[in-house]
């Protein structure tokens, strides 16, 4: 019997501060797909598709979800799970659940200053927030959100001095973890962006104007405050001569090209950054081993949410072999396709310490800003809690391969 007040027992999940809108959101949006549908209604088509869709034939995008459905869970019966908790520690600090908000360049198009709202939601929920290089809100404004853990994601530019200066800014602003994205050497191929008139750099053209005109709510809630407070939204960290929102997050201008990033860069970054460094986009066990040699603290297994290399393998499919190679030497994190708390449990059962989640909080932010993002996190945590109860895991560390049935793979 694990009575919650027994010595050494876990603290039950503390209820999160309930946002003003929580009851209304909880009534209407029962899962992440509901939030996705809500986002689809509210955003101009070009913005929604930029957030929602994948690259080329979108095979990876679809397979990311299928990979979670291929793996089944097993009940664990007759154990007292009344004291279960989703809390855990990562890099020596507590988190309310094993999830961090992934870097996404488009939060500021989902909601006015969307990155700030995501950072606030993450702080309230007790999970880290990652600010992306191409975000519309600057490092220092995010740092003004006093609570919460902040991570910074780097797209390394050909102009190393500019990139290193950005990393120093994030360090000086108190960001704790640096994610170096390694899977975006060149801009990916996403044909719908072109069809939607969503070119890089973003400019108003007849297709976009017609699209935006069908979303007066978005114009009012998102575009109007930008225009009233300094003009068209633009990426806050890009050199000032790169005007406008870049739909391509790397490439375009010569100095923003990202195709010469290599392992040698880690040593230089390590001189600047004393906190944890993670390399994102890893699929190969020997890349993970190279990461160990270069002294990185973790890797993120990811196919960029199906947005970059199409038909790239799903993270779950390569997780076991990578964990077998390096799981005891660095922190293995996974992302791409998580839409349910049970998906988090599956990634952990295969050896990930934590997951990143990209689109779920963007959908939430598009629906209701900070409260919507918070609601997305609350849904995922509740589902994780439920899956833990059924699989008999009281603590996060008790989520192991025994929770899974891998089938005829
Ligand atoms: C709209 C959008 C923008 C993104 N921008 C970045 C980025 O700037 N840097 C980066 O490393 N990853 C970026 N990603 C990828 C996410 O960090 C993450 O790997 C992915 O979203 C995980 O898949 P999920 O959306 O299915 O959770 C972006 C993802 C989305 C959806």
Image (spheres, helix red, strand yellow):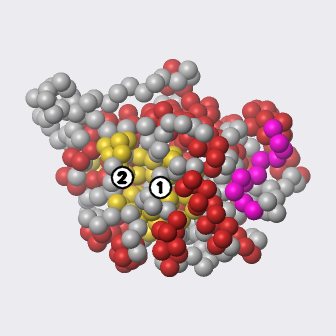
Q: Which residues are magenta?
A: 229-239
Q: Where residue 214 appears, x then y in whole percent?
A: 80, 39
Q: Which residue in the structure is indicated by mark 1?
A: 177
Q: Is residue 196 left or right of residue 308?
A: right
Judge the density around disc 2: few (<14), some (14-19), many (≥20) Cα neighbours within 10 Å.
few
Displayed-image quarter of ligand 1: bottom right
Q: Is residue 318 left or right of residue 205?
A: left
Mark 1 and mark 2: span between their CA atoms? 9 Å
- Res 169 quadrant in image: bottom right
> What's the residue at 41%, 67% (across, down)?
296
> What's the residue at 48%, 77% (across, down)?
263
Of helix, strand and loop, which mostly describes the magenta segment? loop
Are discs 1 and 2 less than 8 Å apart at CB? yes
Q: Where residue 121 appears, x then y in whole percent?
A: 53, 35
Q: Secondary structure at mark 2?
A: loop
**Quadrant position of the N terminus in the picture:** top left
Q: Is residue 361 visible in this depiction of the protein?
A: yes
Q: Which residue in the structure is indicated by mark 2?
A: 91
Which of disc 2 and disc 1 is earlier in sequence? 2
- Res 260 quadrant in image: bottom right
**Quadrant position of the C terminus in the picture:** bottom left
233 falls in the magenta region: yes
């Amino acid at each position: 019997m694990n009575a919650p007040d027994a010595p050494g027992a876990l603290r039950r999940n503390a209820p999160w501060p309930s946002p003003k809108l929580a009851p209304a959101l909880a009534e209407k949006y029962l899962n992440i797909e509901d939030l996705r549908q809500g986002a689809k209604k509210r955003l101009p088509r070009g913005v929604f598709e930029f957030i929602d869709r994948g690259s080329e034939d979108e095979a990876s995008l679809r397979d990311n979800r299928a990979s979670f459905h291929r793996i089944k869970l097993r009940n664990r019966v007759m154990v007292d799970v009344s004291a279960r908790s989703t809390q855990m520690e990562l890099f020596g600090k507590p988190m309310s659940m094993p999830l961090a908000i992934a870097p996404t360049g488009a939060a500021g198009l989902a909601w006015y200053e969307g990155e700030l709202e995501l950072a606030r939601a993450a702080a309230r929920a007790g999970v880290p927030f990652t600010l992306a290089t191409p975000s519309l809100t600057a490092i220092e404004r995010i740092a003004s959100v006093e609570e919460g853990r902040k991570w910074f994601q780097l797209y390394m530019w050909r102009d190393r001095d500019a990139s290193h200066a950005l990393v120093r800014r994030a360090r000086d602003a108190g960001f704790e973890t640096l994610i170096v994205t390694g899977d975006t050497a060149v801009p990916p191929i996403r044909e719908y962006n072109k069809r939607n008139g969503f070119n890089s750099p973003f400019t108003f053209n007849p297709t976009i104007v017609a699209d935006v005109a069908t979303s007066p709510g978005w114009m009012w809630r998102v575009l109007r405050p930008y225009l009233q407070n300094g003009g068209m939204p633009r990426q806050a960290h890009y050199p000032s001569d790169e005007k406008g929102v870049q739909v391509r997050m790397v490439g375009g201008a010569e100095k923003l090209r990202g195709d010469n990033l290599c392992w040698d860069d880690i040593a230089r970054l390590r001189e600047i950054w004393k906190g944890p460094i993670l390399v994102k986009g890893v699929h190969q066990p020997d890349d993970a081993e190279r990461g160990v040699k270069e002294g990185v603290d973790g890797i993120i297994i990811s196919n960029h949410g199906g947005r970059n290399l199409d038909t790239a393998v799903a993270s779950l499919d390569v997780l076991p072999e990578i964990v077998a190679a390096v799981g005891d030497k660095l922190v293995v994190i996974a992302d791409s396709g998580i839409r349910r708390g049970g998906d988090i449990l599956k990634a952990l059962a295969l050896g990930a310490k934590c997951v990143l989640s990209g689109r779920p909080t963007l959908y939430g932010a598009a629906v209701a800003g900070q409260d919507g993002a918070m609601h997305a996190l609350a849904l995922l945590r509740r589902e994780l809690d439920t899956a833990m109860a059924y699989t008999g895991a009281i603590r996060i560390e008790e989520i192991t391969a025994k929770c899974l049935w891998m089938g005829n793979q």
